[in-house]
Image: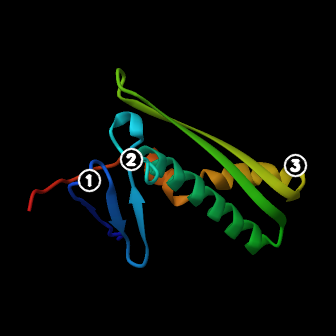
Amino acid sequence: MEKITVHIGKQNYKVDAKGARQSLVIDEPVEVGGQDLGLSPKELLAVSLGSCTSITLKMYTNHKGWDLNDVNIEVTLDWNKETLTTSFTRKIELIGNLDDTQRERLLKIADSCPVHKILTNSTEIETKII
């Protein structure tokens, strides 16, 4: 189970987040009242998908001994407030000596990353005030 803590103080929208070993700052853009000191929460969600995908692809190709030099991923997140739907567009650039069969396999592996599975399966959120 992953556990993080977040804290927001008097400074509008600047959040300090801490994981087990690392920390980061999250903030909103200036145009919505933040100071743009870090990625926004929605950007972090897109980063989670992109980074998990790239790590999964690298692990898989390392295990297979395939020639994958670089992975570049662009993730676009669109949240429709009217329909309450979220869509992600993930564009993956694979740089290396890979044939078409390997590239097709990596497309399937991309959908196997843990964050992809979390986002595409049923999610429950339990909230408690302490």
Outermost residue to the bottom: 21
Identify the element where label 1 is drawn: loop
Identify the element where label 2 is drawn: loop
Q: Residues within 10 Å of mark 2 (few under 14, many from 20)?
A: some
Q: Is residue 91 left or right of residue 39?
A: right
Q: Is residue 122 above or below residue 80?
A: below
Who's the residue at 22% across and 58% down the image? Answer: 9
Q: Is residue 11 above or below residue 58?
A: above
| Rendered image quadrant of residue 80 | top left
Of the residues under marks 2 and 3, which one precedes in the sequence? 2
Of the residues under marks 2 and 1, which one precedes in the sequence? 1
Q: Amino acid at mark 2?
A: Gln
Q: Residues within 10 Å of mark 3 (few under 14, many from 20)?
A: few
**Residue designated by label 1:** 11
The alpha-carbon separation of the residues under discs 2 and 3 comes to: 45 Å
| Image quadrant where one finds the C terminus | bottom left
Percent coordinates x, y for residue 15 in the rendering: 32, 57
**Residue designated by label 3:** 100
Q: Amino acid at mark 1?
A: Gln
